[in-house]
Image: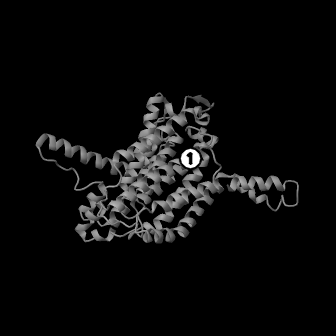
């Protein structure tokens, strides 16, 4: 909105005495300025809305009144009861500030609209899941197949829309001379390899589906300790703030030989808003947490990261940058698969980890919650550095 409002004012004042005094409004044309503005705005809004949202959730009795995995894992150290009664659905704060800030600071285009749509849809799905957990008091929430169905439907819609969208149907891959390659959905970019690989529409749709759904659920699984999921999301968001800016700038894209997506620069503003909203939420979610994001926030943030990666043609970079998310999801898959396999072979199910997701495994090994979170942050930073290295190592 600020972008369009500044243009309107400058056009209206052209040729008048107000033209020179209001010339500073040209700053709103620059993505870098709007990126900084979005980060600060989202942070301030989170600080302002945060206490109000927490108080509202408490008034509605939307607290965690069931024993979740974090409580079970922490009970060995006498911390099991600390999680009970803490308001959940704090993801409403993230979705609200992120969407509002994006509306204020971006120059709207199809890529931004798709991203905000995914945040709202997945946030609503997470809200339904959290509400079911609270009202039933069992912690089970919505049926997994219902959640998966909504996620798959959203991802397929996005994939098909991108396949037909003119702005992405012809993806320029800058080299010494820019060339046109096939549709964004049907071309795969692999880290540490500079040339695009045509894989076809079906494979492209499956990759889009796997990236969005997988990222959404992986962040959801990571959300089990105070500040863990939101902190790791912040680190990965910084990676994609850099990646979206480079992908949306023709000169830097040509220099680095990465795909140039003309409207991707505005996703930089979205990533900045996500960072600001995440920092504001972490203010209230750090140990001991005053509020949990719940599925309302984790599903929305994970889906947004997956979609941004798809929109700049770097889903495999997300796999690297989000290494902590991959560890969390992978631990659950391995534990479940091995338990079923060993029960089939021996009649008794066996475990690989003491408890999954893997952050609870380390709690069971008597790591303090803050130790687990901080060490996972360090791992996430290392994964982020490797992901950024893919820009030059090819």
Q: Position of residue 148 (x, y in %)?
A: 38, 44
Residue extending farthest to the front is 135
* Relative to 244, 393 lies left or right: left
Q: Residue at coordinates 53% horizontally, 48% vertically from top-left?
A: 117
In the shown orientation, is residue 379 left or right of residue 334?
right
Q: Position of residue 145 (x, y in %)?
A: 35, 44
Q: Is residue 326 left or right of residue 362?
A: right
> Which image quarter: residue 21?
bottom right
Q: Give SS at disc 1.
A: helix
- Quarter assignment of residue 163: top right
Identify the residue at horizontal 47%, vertical 69% (top origin).
Answer: 56
Q: Nearer the viewer, residue 259 or 148?
A: 148
Q: Would you call the spot at circle 1 few (<14 residues within 10 Å), some (14-19), or many (20 or more)?
A: many
Left or right of 83 on screen, residue 179: right
In the depicted structure, whether residue 383 falls above or below residue 45? above
Of the pair 65 and 358, the residue shown nearer to us: 65
Q: Residue at x 50, y 38 (%)?
A: 157
| Position in image of residue 250 (x %, y %) | 63, 40
Instruction: Provide the residue designation for mark 1.
Output: 244
Residue 191 makes an appearance in the image:
no
Relative height, residue 28 to residue 61 (above, below): above
- Seen at 62% across and 54% down, the residue is 103
């Amino acid at each position: 909105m600020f972008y369009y409002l500044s243009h309107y004012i400058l056009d209206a004042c052209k040729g008048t005495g107000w033209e020179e005094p209001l010339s500073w409004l040209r700053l709103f044309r620059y993505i870098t300025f709007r990126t900084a503005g979005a980060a600060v705005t989202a942070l301030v809004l989170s600080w302002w809305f945060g206490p109000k949202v927490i108080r509202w959730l408490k008034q509605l009795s939307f607290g965690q009144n069931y024993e979740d995995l974090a409580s079970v894992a922490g009970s060995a150290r006498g911390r099991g009861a600390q999680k009970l009664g803490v308001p959940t659905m704090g993801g409403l704060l993230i979705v609200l500030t992120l969407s509002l800030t994006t509306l204020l600071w971006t120059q709207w285009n199809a890529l931004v609209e798709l991203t905000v749509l995914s945040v709202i849809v997945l946030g609503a799905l997470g809200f339904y899941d959290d509400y079911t957990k609270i009202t039933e008091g069992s912690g089970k929430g919505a049926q997994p197949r219902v959640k998966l169905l909504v996620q798959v439907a959203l991802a397929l819609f996005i994939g098909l829309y991108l396949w037909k969208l003119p702005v992405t149907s012809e993806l320029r891959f800058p080299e010494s001379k820019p060339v046109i390659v096939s549709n964004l959905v049907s071309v795969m970019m692999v880290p540490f390899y500079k040339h695009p690989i045509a894989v076809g529409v079906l494979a492209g749709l499956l990759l889009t589906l796997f990236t969005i759904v997988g990222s959404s659920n992986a962040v959801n699984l990571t959300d089990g300790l105070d500040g863990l999921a939101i902190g790791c999301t912040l680190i990965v968001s910084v990676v994609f703030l850099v990646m979206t800016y480079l992908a949306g700038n023709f000169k830097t894209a040509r220099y680095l030989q990465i795909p140039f997506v003309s409207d991707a620069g505005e996703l930089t503003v979205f990533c900045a808003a996500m960072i600001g909203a995440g920092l504001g939420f972490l203010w209230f979610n750090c140990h001991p947490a005053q509020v949990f994001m719940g599925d309302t926030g984790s599903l929305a943030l994970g889906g947004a990261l997956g979609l941004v990666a798809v929109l700049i043609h770097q889903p495999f970079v997300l796999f690297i940058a989000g290494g902590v998310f991959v560890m969390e999801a992978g631990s659950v898959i391995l534990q479940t698969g091995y338990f079923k396999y060993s029960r089939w072979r021996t009649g008794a199910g066996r475990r690989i980890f003491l408890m999954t997701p893997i952050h609870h495994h380390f709690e069971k090994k008597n790591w303090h919650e803050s130790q687990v979170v901080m060490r996972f942050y360090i791992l996430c930073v290392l994964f982020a550095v490797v992901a950024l290295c893919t820009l030059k190592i090819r």
